[in-house]
C-alpha cells in the first residue's frame, strides 16, 4: 500500500491576528486613545528645514516631538510642567437671574453636577500635554449620565473643519484612511459613517452638503464629526493641523541629549586608568623574562585592581596624560545646553532645581499667565454641555501654587460682601460636592458634634468667652508684663 501524504501542519504565527486595543469600553478611566505614537529621530539640520514652514511640516515635527517625549527627560519635564500649572477652579452662574429661587437652585445643581462629571480636573493635564506634544488633538465625548469617557482620535485621520456657533472646534475624519480591522475601535458615529462610505462604493468625488446651514462642497470620504467631537490646537490658531508647541526648541533638546551621550562616553573612556608594569630588558632591548611568567604577572595584576583599571605590561617607557581638563570641558558643554534650553523656554532654572529662589514666584506666575488662554477650549466645551440649564462656567485664572493664597483672600472678603461661590471654588473640591457636603453637615447637625468656639472678636458682652476670665482685682498676664517693662 502506497504511503499516504501527511498533511502539512500549520503552526500559529506570532501576532498573526489583530487584537483590538479598545474592545472593552470601561468607565473606570475617563480617557483612552486610538493613537499610534511611533516616532522618528531627525538631525538638527533637518529640524531647521522643517521649521521654515512648520504648518506644512507638522507631521514630521510631530515625529520629532514624540521621539523627544520618549527619549528626552528635559522635554517631558517642560511638557508636564506647563500642562499641570492651572488649578482649573471654576464658578457656575446663570445667564440671567431667575426670580424663582427653586428653579435657579435646580438649574445650578444640575449644571454643577454636569461640570463635576466631566472630570476636567483629573484629565485636563493629560489633554493639554497631548496637545502640546502633538500640536493638534482630536477628541470624542462618549459621556452619558453615568460615565465620563473621552476618546482621543488618531490625528493622522483628522483635520480641523470649523468653529461652530457654540464655539466648539469641530473636525473632519478622513474615512479613506480607516481600515476594516480598526474601524470598530472608533465611536459608533465614525463606524456608521465608514460603513456608509464603504457601501456607497468608496466614491471619492466631491458632493454638495448642507453643513451648519451652509452648502459646502466636500470630498465624500470626509465626515464632519458631530458636536460630540472637538479638537484643540497648541497655538490656538484656526488651522487644519497645528505643529507641536515647543518645536522651536527641538534643536536645543536634541543637542542636549547628544551632549549627554557624548559626555557619558567620554567620561567612561577617560575614567579608565592604566598601570604600567615594565618588563626588564638587556642592553639590546630584549625582554629578560619568559612570556609565560609575564602573563602570570599580568593576570595577577588584573585580578587585584578595579574594573576601570587596566594593567599594561611591556618593555617601553610610558608618559601619563591627565584627562581631567577634557572632562571639565565636556561638563561645561552640557551645562551650557541646559542653560540654553532654560532661556529658550523662559522657565526659571529654579523650577527643576534648588539653586536659588530669587524670582521664582514671578517666573511661576508668568508661566501660569501663558496657560490661561488654553482655558478657552474647556470653557467652550463645558458651556455647551450645560447650555440646556441656562448656566455658564468660568474658570478662574489661577494656578495650583496660588490656590491657597487666593482661597484666603476670598475668605477675608466674605465679611465685606465677597462672593461665597469664589470661596467654595478654591477649596479644592468640586462646587457640586462642596454644596452637598455643606447640606450633609447641616443634616447631621455637625455643630452639635463638633461645637465651634467663638473667638473674642466674634462675641458680644453677653456671650461666654472662649478663654478663662481674669479674676477680679487681678491683671491679665499681658498687662503684668507691660507694667514690668515700664
Image (spheres, rainbow, N blue to C red):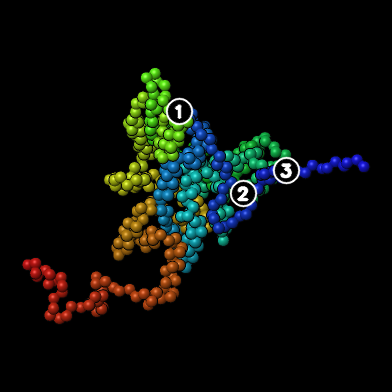
Q: Which mark is nearer the camera, 2 or 1?
A: 1
Q: Is residue 10 left or right of residue 348?
A: right
> As rendered, which of 38 and 51 lies closer to the eye?
38
Going by the image, does 217 lie left or right of 50? Answer: right
| Rendered residue at 45%/28% (across/down) | 290
Q: Residue 374, image x and y in percent?
A: 44, 46
Q: What percent of the width, then of the height, locates residue 397?
A: 38, 51
- Asked if the residue under mark 3 is in contact with the one under mark 1, i.e. CB atoms within 8 Å, the reply is no
Looking at the image, which residue is at 59% across and 40% down?
157
Cβ–Cβ under 8 Å for marks 3 and 2: no
Q: Which residue is mark 3?
A: 199
Q: Alpha carbon of mark 3 to alpha carbon of mark 2: how far?
A: 26 Å
The disc, 1 or 3, on the residue closer to the chain's N-terminal end is 3
For mark 2, does the 10 Å Cα neighbourhood hold few (<14), some (14 to 19), or many (20 or more) residues? few
Going 37% across and 63% down the picture, which residue do you hit? 420
Question: Based on the displayed image, in which of its 4 quarters is residue 336 positioned?
Answer: top left
**Other residues around mark 3 within 10 Å, as few (<14) / some (14–19) / many (≥20):** few
Numbered mark located on residue 290 in the image:
1
Residue 369 at x, y percent in the picture? 37, 46
In the picture, which quadrant includes the N terminus? top right
Q: Where does the image place residue 477, in percent across and percent down from the top left?
A: 15, 72
In the rendering, which numbered label is found on residue 21? 2
* Local SS, label 2: loop
Amino acid at each position: 500500500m502506497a504511503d499516504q501524504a501527511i498533511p502539512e501542519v500549520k503552526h500559529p504565527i506570532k501576532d498573526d491576528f489583530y487584537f483590538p486595543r479598545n474592545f472593552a469600553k470601561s468607565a473606570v478611566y475617563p480617557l483612552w486613545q486610538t493613537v499610534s505614537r511611533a516616532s522618528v529621530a531627525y538631525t538638527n539640520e533637518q529640524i531647521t528645514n522643517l521649521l521654515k514652514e512648520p504648518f506644512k511640516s507638522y507631521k514630521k515635527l510631530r515625529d520629532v516631538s514624540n521621539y523627544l517625549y520618549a527619549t528626552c527627560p528635559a522635554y517631558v519635564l517642560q511638557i508636564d510642567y506647563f500642562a499641570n500649572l492651572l488649578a482649573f477652579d471654576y464658578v457656575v452662574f446663570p445667564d440671567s437671574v431667575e426670580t424663582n429661587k427653586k428653579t435657579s437652585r435646580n438649574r445650578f445643581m444640575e449644571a454643577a453636577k454636569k461640570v463635576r462629571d466631566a472630570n476636567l480636573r483629573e484629565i485636563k493635564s493629560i489633554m493639554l500635554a497631548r496637545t502640546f506634544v502633538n500640536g493638534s488633538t482630536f477628541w470624542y465625548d462618549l459621556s452619558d449620565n453615568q460615565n465620563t469617557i473621552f476618546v482621543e482620535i488618531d490625528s493622522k485621520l483628522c483635520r480641523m473643519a470649523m468653529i461652530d456657533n457654540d464655539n466648539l472646534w469641530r473636525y473632519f475624519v478622513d474615512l479613506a484612511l480607516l481600515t476594516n480591522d480598526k474601524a470598530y475601535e472608533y465611536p459608533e458615529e465614525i463606524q456608521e459613517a465608514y460603513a456608509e462610505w464603504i457601501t456607497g462604493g468608496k466614491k471619492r468625488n466631491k458632493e454638495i452638503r448642507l453643513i451648519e446651514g451652509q452648502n459646502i462642497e466636500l470630498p465624500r470620504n470626509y465626515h464632519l464629526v458631530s458636536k460630540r467631537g472637538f479638537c484643540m490646537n497648541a497655538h490656538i490658531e484656526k488651522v487644519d493641523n497645528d505643529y507641536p508647541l515647543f518645536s522651536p526648541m527641538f534643536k536645543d533638546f536634541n543637542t542636549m541629549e547628544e551632549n549627554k551621550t557624548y559626555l557619558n562616553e567620554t567620561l567612561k573612556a577617560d575614567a579608565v586608568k592604566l598601570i604600567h608594569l615594565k618588563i626588564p630588558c638587556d642592553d639590546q632591548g630584549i625582554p629578560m623574562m619568559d612570556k609565560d611568567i609575564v602573563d602570570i604577572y599580568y593576570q595577577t595584576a588584573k585580578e587585584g585592581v578595579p574594573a576601570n583599571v587596566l594593567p599594561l605590561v611591556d618593555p617601553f617607557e610610558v608618559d601619563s596624560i591627565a584627562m581631567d581638563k577634557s572632562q571639565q570641558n565636556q561638563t561645561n558643554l552640557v551645562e551650557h545646553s541646559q542653560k540654553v534650553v532654560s532661556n529658550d523656554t523662559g522657565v526659571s532654572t529654579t523650577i527643576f532645581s534648588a539653586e536659588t529662589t530669587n524670582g521664582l514666584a514671578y517666573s511661576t506666575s508668568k508661566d501660569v499667565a501663558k496657560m490661561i488662554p488654553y482655558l478657552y477650549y474647556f470653557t467652550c466645551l463645558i458651556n455647551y454641555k450645560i447650555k440646556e440649564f441656562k448656566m455658564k462656567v468660568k474658570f478662574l485664572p489661577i494656578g495650583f501654587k496660588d490656590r491657597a493664597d487666593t482661597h484666603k483672600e476670598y475668605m477675608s472678603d466674605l465679611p465685606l460682601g465677597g462672593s461665597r461661590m469664589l470661596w467654595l471654588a478654591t477649596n479644592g473640591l468640586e462646587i457640586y460636592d462642596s454644596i452637598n457636603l455643606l447640606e450633609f453637615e447641616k443634616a447631621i447637625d455637625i455643630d452639635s458634634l463638633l461645637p465651634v468656639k467663638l473667638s473674642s472678636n466674634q462675641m458680644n458682652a453677653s456671650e461666654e468667652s472662649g478663654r478663662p476670665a481674669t479674676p477680679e482685682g487681678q491683671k491679665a498676664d499681658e498687662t503684668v508684663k507691660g507694667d514690668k517693662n515700664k
